[in-house]
Amino acid sequence: MKVYRQFIARLAPHAGMAVLIFAIFSIVLYGLFYLLFEYFDRPWLAALAFTGLAVLFAMAALGWFLKHDLVAALKDADKKVKTERIPAANFHETLLGVISLKLSHFALTYFLVAECFLFSCYAWAAVYPDTFTRNVSFVDINYFVLDLTLKGAVFDFMEHFDKSVSHLTVSPEARGFFMYAFYFRLFVSLVVVGSVVRAVSLFKLAFAFPENKTLLAKLARNLSPKP
């Protein structure tokens, strides 16, 4: 239980900073959306802009997924110990901090993807009123994005049991938007679920043998490049 408390203690400030950054980004993104969609009355420009941002943040999340693994966590912890002259006995605590920081960064990136996707969906629905089979509101779009996220995260569970949190369906004529929504769901399935699996492996690294701190430190030194 001591290790879990240590991890939560290190995760809390990183998660708090991630929430603060997300709040700032949300204000900026909402302001940009309001300018393009309402003030300048250019919903097509808002749709293109936020589609591009969603793709950009998705690529960042994909890069995180490919770059940050068990070896990267050990190397980063070892580098931090050497740079900040942290005692070797505290290597395990440093590793917990590195893992919590990585998880906070990824969560921030994912929620930015979802937020940009949400704004883009609302803008595309305004540009092409036939995107959905009925008129939609901003609240409807929120439930639509949540539904795609849940279906992507738990694969076919919701469809198999005919469960849904949204009543919106994409019109058969809106093939481009249908593929756009499909790619978002695929992003959730491949990157988010894959990253959860990777996060579990990081947890195992941090919690499996917390008493053997010298073994983790030695392994990190062997993995790190020699000067």
Image (tube, rainbow, N blue to C red):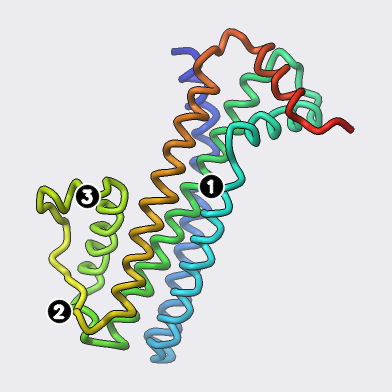
Return the residue found at the far top: 211
Q: Residue at x 59, y 41 (%)?
A: 68
Q: Amino acid at mark 3?
A: Asp
The residue labelled by disc 2 is 133
Q: Amino acid at mark 1?
A: Phe
Instruction: Classify 143 as above or below 96.
Output: below
Q: Amino acid at mark 2?
A: Thr
Q: Which mark is residue 213?
A: none
Q: Front-most of 43 and 48?
A: 48
Q: Earlier in the sequence, mark 3 or mark 2?
A: 2
The residue labelled by disc 3 is 156
Instruction: Identify the image quadrant of the N terminus.
Output: top left
Q: Give the quarter of the image for residue 167.
A: bottom left
**In this rendering, position of residue 46 left or right of residue 219:** left
Judged from the image, the secondary structure of the residue bearing numbered disc 3 is loop
Q: Front-most of 43 and 21?
A: 43
The residue labelled by disc 1 is 65
Q: Front-most of 82 and 27?
A: 82
